[in-house]
Each structure stands twice: as structure tokens, then as C-alpha cells.
Amino acid sequence: MRIAVSTETNAGLDAPVAGHFGRCPFFTLIDLETEQIQAVQVVANPFFPNHEPGQVPGFIHAQSAHVMLTGGMGGRAVAFFEQYGIRPVTGASGTVRQALECFQRGELGGYAPCSESVAHGHGHDHEHHEGR
């Protein structure tokens, strides 16, 4: 299983989880096999700091991720991820390693669209484009 985590830096497992996946500068990709880390790769977000709806979920899909762990994301992004068959998981915090451990223990698993995303939506002059 490949898990993508939105991150603020390129420090791999020690990077802080980004509060919002679409505005993060990096993604840490973790390959797991029977709950054990097999590989860790950091990739730059090609759409940082501005993106159009669907671009970042499409990029994560192209990275062959099965799960997207992040602090938060908007409702439209959730829908894009679900269309790609990628499981969106919000509420992650701390380092990538800490968020991954929480996910593996079942403490993270669902999602809730960011209230900021719902409030701003599209059509406003705002760099966040994943809201409803």
C-alpha cells in the first residue's frame, strides 16, 4: 500500500504534516508491506502554491497512492480522491511518522471537509481551490 502525506518540508518521516494538502510544498510517499515501511520518497508538489480543482488529486493518483493523509482538505478534493479510488484521511498532525502510526493504529481514518474550504469556495480571489 502506498500512502501519501502532505508535508511542510522534505524531511521524509520527520517532516511536519501540512495543515492542508493542496497548499503543501511536498508530499511524502510511504510504501508499506504488511504494516512495515518498505520505502520513503519525497516529491515536490508541482502545483504549490496555487492549483486548479482536481490537479493535486490527479498528481497523487499518478504517484500510485492508495491513501492521502493530511491535516485538512476541501469537499471537492475529497470527491476527486474518491473518484480516483484514493482514500482521503484528514486530521493528521505532528510528523509524518506520528501521523502514519496513528493511521496504522486506526486513530485516523475518516475525513471532514475544511470549514475554510466551504466558506471560501470557488469564485473568490483566494489560492485555495478545493472547496465546495
Image (cartoon, rainbow, N blue to C red):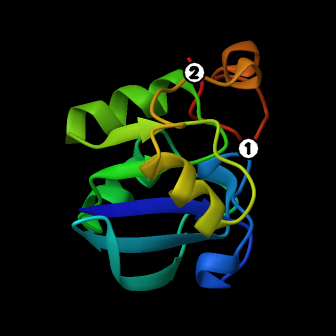
Give the camera-side residue of 96 and 63: 96
Residue drawn at x 28%, y 43% is: 86
Q: Which residue is mark 1?
A: 127
Percent from the top left, x then y, of residue 64?
23, 64
Task: Indicate left or right for 116 with 97 as reference.
Answer: right
Q: Amino acid at mark 1?
A: Glu
Percent from the top left, x then y, of residue 55?
42, 51
Q: Which residue is mark 2?
A: 112
Name the element at disc 1.
loop
Give the camera-side residue of 3 and 113: 3
Which of the 4 image quarters holds residue 2? bottom left
Percent from the top left, x then y, of residue 114?
68, 25
The disc, 2 or 1, on the residue closer to the chain's N-terminal end is 2
State how far apart marks 2 and 1 are (Cα): 20 Å
Task: Indicate left or right for 17 with 58 as reference.
Answer: right
Name the element at disc 2.
loop
Residue drawn at x 59%, y 82% is: 12
Give the camera-side residue of 73 and 35: 35
Which of the 4 image quarters holds residue 121? top right
In what quadrant of the picture does the N terminus appear? bottom left
Q: Amino acid at mark 2?
A: Ala
Residue drawn at x 56%, y 49% is: 102
Percent from the top left, x then y, of residue 96?
61, 66
* Number of other residues with Cα within 10 Å of mark 2, as a class: few under 14, some 14 to 19, many 20 or more: some
In what quadrant of the picture does the C terminus appear? top right
**Looking at the picture, does residue 13 appear above or below residue 34?**
below
Residue drawn at x 34%, y 34% is: 80
**Looking at the picture, does residue 62 appear above or below residue 81?**
below
